[in-house]
Image (cartoon, rainbow, N blue to C red):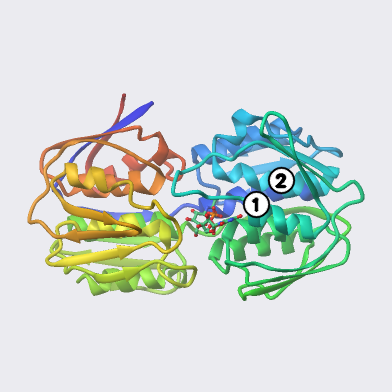
Amino acid sequence: MKALTICGTRGLFGSVRIPGAKNSVLPMLAASVLCHGTVTLTNVPCLSDVASSVRILQSIGCRITQHSGCISVTSPETPGNAVSEELMRTMRSSLFYLAPMLARTGRARIGTPGGCRLGARPIDMHLSGLARMGARAEENADGSLTLSAPDGLSGADITLRFPSVGTTETLLMAASTARGESVLRGVATEPEVTDLARFLQSAGADITGIGTRTLRVRGSDCLMGTRYAVCPDRITAATVLCAVAGCGGEVLLTNIRSAHMAEVLRALRGAGCMISASGEDSAALASDGTLRAAGERETGVYPAFPTDAAPLLAAALLRAEGESRVTDTIFENRFACAEGFAALGARVSVRGRTLEVRGVPRLAGAALRAPDLRGGAALVIAALQAEGESRIAEAQHISRGYEDIASLFASLGADIAWVNQ
Ligand code: UD1
């Protein structure tokens, strides 16, 4: 178990090169299982979820080589078709192995996926989509699930009841090597979904409609090895911007796609930050640390304001003048970090899916606990603005999605360090 100590109230100054996106690389690693030949991913972030993915890949017989930001995966002729309960529980993205194992072996056995407890997070849409493609599901005595498709998966016309990111990715992977054509309607268009589709295309998949709500996929007999650069992590970029907005300072972000971040940039501009984008792949933010409240703000599916950035924006607004109400329409329990905000002296309350923030002039260091990945990062942003020392326990949640959050903010001048819990 790891903890972070943070002494706040300094301005943050410098530049940050944003690493590859967690939510792109995790499904791509799973999709590598579909490929005959070696897949090499570049711009891979060094995260504990990536390490968990490597363990899953090795457990089903894949050969992995890794060096500085690069991972190569070579899938065996017949990969394993089960992920152990222990590995399933490491992260939500263990679910991404379901479709590739099923497609390659005709069978897949999985337990309950782990990950942040943001709400119920059922997997019914993944399962009903795969069922439409011919998979039969059976619950085992130990609660695990076995899916089988002895004659392989067949293309299908599937309409999602909600544009779920994970379901779109599961069905894209399944459809890429299914027999015949699939039409996936009402899909998610998040940049990471588009990135996965482009990765699959580079491996030989026949996909059209990328970036729209309808994807057409003509199943290929087999996908090949490929080399692909993972797109930059818009949520890591949002984390740095929200921290500098709240603390005050100036930062230049490089290796971003500013088009992926339009709503986050708009919200921070509205709060009083100066933002200049010099081209599509970099942006600079300057803040004097005295922000205006955001009024009402709601998350939604892309291109709306991202759910993952909701606690990050709320953390930046804790000392803003006025009242902000941030509502997450995607998950039921996005604001578990509110307890930590309150411990720092913030005036916050959670009503249903809405976090209400009434700005206070100052925050004071406190003992905190990271409730989940983005909630933990939000507490870092809040603690960076607080006078005196804060300690964030259970900070391993944060390492699931950030390479090294202490080095990241220390490079901008923050007083932050890892300690043993
Ligand atoms: C992904 C991201 C996560 C992000 C989220 C929304 C990864 C690894 N994680 O999560 O960081 O916050 O998208 O942008 O990419 N749902 C169902 N049944 C299902 C699947 C989903 O009811 O079978 C519901 C969920 O409970 C949730 C909503 O749909 O309320 C959205 O979930 P989804 O888009 O699937 O998110 P994830 O793929 O889990």
Q: Which residue is more in the foreground, 389 or 305? A: 305
Mark yes or no: residue 36 visible. no
Classify 10 Å Cα crowding around label 1: few (below 14), some (14-19), many (20 and above): many
> Disc 1 vs disc 2: Cβ atoms closer than 8 Å?
no
Residue at left offset 63%, top offset 58%: 167
Q: Earlier in the sequence, mark 1 or mark 2?
A: 1
Residue sitting farthest toward the left: 361
Label 1 residue SS: helix
Which residue was labeled with disc 1? 28
When the figure is inspected, residue 218 is found, relative to residue 126, above or below; the finding is below
What is the number of the mark on residue 98?
A: 2
Mark 2 belongs to which amino acid? Leu
Q: How far from the left and from the top, in percent, is residue 252?
A: 32, 61
Q: Quadrant of residue 308?
A: bottom left
Residue at left offset 38%, top offset 49%: 374
What is the number of the mark on residue 303?
A: none
Does the beta carbon at disc 1 come under 8 Å from ligand 1? no
